[in-house]
Image: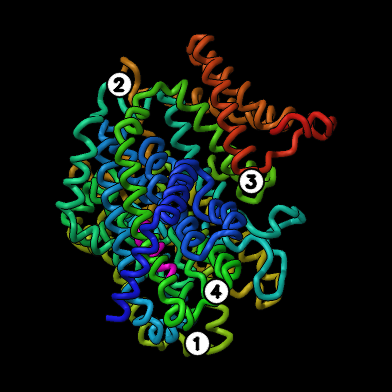
Amino acid sequence: MEILGTAADALLVMLELERLGYLFAGVLIGLALGVIPGLGGIVGMALLLPFTFDMDSYSAFAFLLGMGSVTTTSDTIPAVLFGVPGTAGSAATVLDGHPLAKQGQAGRAFGAAYTASLAGGVFGALMLGASVPILRPVMLEVGSPELTAFAVFGLCMVSALSGGSPLRGLVAAGFGLLVAFIGQDPQIGVHRYTYGWLYLWDGLSIIPITLGLFALPELADMAIARRSIAREGAVDTRAGQWQGVKDTFRNWFLVLRCGAIGAGLGSLPGMGSAVIDWIAYGHALGTEKEAAKTFGTGDIRGVLASEGSNNAKEGGALVPTIAFGVPGSAQMAILLGAFLIQGLVPGPSMLTTNLEVTYSMVWSVALANILGAGVCFLFSNQFARISVVRHSIILPLILAVLFVGAFQGNRDWGDLVILIVFGIIGWVMKRNGWPRPPVILGVVLGGIIERYLWISTKRYGLEWMSNWLVIILFLIAVVVLALPLIRDMRGESGFRGVISRIGRPRLDVNSWIYAAFIAVFVFAVSEASEWRFDARFVPQVFGWAALAIAIVSFAWHTVVRAPEAGAASGIRERMLNQARLDISSDDSGEFDRALVRRRALGFAAWIACFLALTFLVGMLPTIFLFTLAFMIVEGERWPPALAIAAGLTVFCWYLFNELLALPWPNSLLGNLSPELKAAVPGI
């Protein structure tokens, strides 16, 4: 009863006009940051933290948590409309949300996403309120072996996201892991795969990698097809979002399960949103009826799974942060600064003397999700209309924001280089049926796996693998990996049916992609052999494993013939077809390869021009010149093109330079004329 009374008192405090004002201000800022690729909760938390010095504890946490709780609500907008994840937490939403937008059902995707986000966010807040006192003894029992097993389990979930081809998914994940090992070794400070480039010392930022793998390939496809996201007149902006709300209630148990996954995994330090939504998506794929046939092609349940989990993790991440002072996510690590500013100490005191402040955080998360979903619902129809805007207008607008966002990774020219490199990799993978999500999952989990595996091995030797929870998680991972193979064999008359399809080796484009991956893995393990043991242990373990899997997968692809048309069906064929470039022409049928190649090179030339202009005169002037030139060349009239280019430039100047005070890339003109650089931002 005492706890319920304290919770009620905290609610009354949060409903005061001043606290609601701070909460709503934080919500609006969070929604704006979530829409812009490359920004998000971490950037917002860092930017808003200095403004809390003069606030009381209730107002400060309402402001910060109001912002942080809703970035994964509004990040749905670019994920659905453009196939560009606004934050890492919406990457899985792209798989089904963007195909729905292409089918003219953006409004439906928004309605489902906002409702699931609201339900997940409130569920996470309720879990936080109920579990802080209960989970304290449980959390103290979770050590590095269990966290290692959780990370490996998350990595093995790629098999559920790889079109029924777990080996190919693991090859991609192995590549992501090796990317994560670039930079200084966390144990002894050895520089790994840096080759004297200072930018690589701290490793690669997830922001340009994510935007390169997912955003640039989608924009390239749009440029090649030269059409809007959805066909003109196909968007239902009136009833669509309410259909999405009905979908959420129709699949309420799925949303509840994914909310529990998000909140539960969010309470484990290091299991961030970039991992949680994929695990929830994989859970839905493995448990929902007929999901294997429809996920990845515009199934609303895929949107519900991702969005139901990523908002719930915020409440879960607060559990270890409040109870132990151990941040449940990078965003929570910054929030710990607010504890110091307010003179609060995470730990037992937050469950006793400061319990009212703790429950004010619970109400802040819950109210923020309600307010955030409400604001998004009000403008959902307007957002859906964006999907029928012409490519000549949409493309330069997205590209401008994309480059600004990518530069915020390490705020170095190297971020833009990495964006382009992974954009090329992502486009090649998309064209040839390779799953891209496992690469991101490998990059995100690489540091987590290395840290906890090294600690577990150093402290326990191999005995950590005998832990009962570790054994259970590894067994589940093995089952997850084996199921697609078992389904394949059942659909092809068992093992004998597979053997009967073995023939003479054949080489195609995918064979060269396999060769490239194998070469990367061989190079990585050979380079690692020259480092000290502590630095090479984890990279070599996973490098050799990835090399072995790549060789087996290459052999399977090369010597096993595909089944006859109609002989097999399921997610493998659907996902591979959907992963290839899906372009319909204007009136003359499908584009031929020569036209696709020519338009792809034209898009690459536009990207090169943007980078060259940025290097010469700065990014802000480039945004104006690039937008104007692109629209004129693509057939837009001068007056609207000039107005849009000027409007976008002013918007970027005010938002990025004045409000957020983000840095701009150095340019040749700015270096030659420091006075001009000081007078004109973005040069």
Q: Say which quarter of the image contains residue 482.
A: bottom left
Of 160 and 145, nearer the camera is 145
**Of the numbered discs in the image, which one, if any, rests on residue 202?**
none
Q: Kindly report the distance in space between the C-alpha atoms of the residues bearing marks 3 and 4.
A: 37 Å
Which residue is found at the position 52% from the left and 63% from the top? 56
Name the N-terminal-most of marks 2 and 3.
2
Judge the density around disc 4: few (<14), some (14-19), many (≥20) Cα neighbours within 10 Å: some
Which residue carries the number 1 mark?
462
Of 263 and 218, nearer the camera is 263
- From the image, state whether disc 3 or disc 1 is nearer to you: 3
Q: Is residue 503 visible?
A: yes
Identity of the amino acid at label 3?
Asp
Q: What x and y, as percent, mark residue 57?
A: 51, 65
Identity of the amino acid at label 4?
Leu
Q: Main secondary structure of the magenta part?
A: helix
Which residue carries the number 2 mark?
232
Q: Say which quarter of the image contains residue 182.
A: bottom right
Q: Kindly report the distance in space between the C-alpha atoms of the residues bearing marks 2 and 3.
A: 36 Å
Name the N-terminal-most of marks 1 and 2.
2
Q: Which residues are magenta?
A: 310-318
Name the N-terminal-most of marks 4 and 2.
2
Q: What x and y, as percent, mark residue 629?
A: 58, 17
**Of the numbered discs in the image, which one, if any, rests on residue 344?**
4
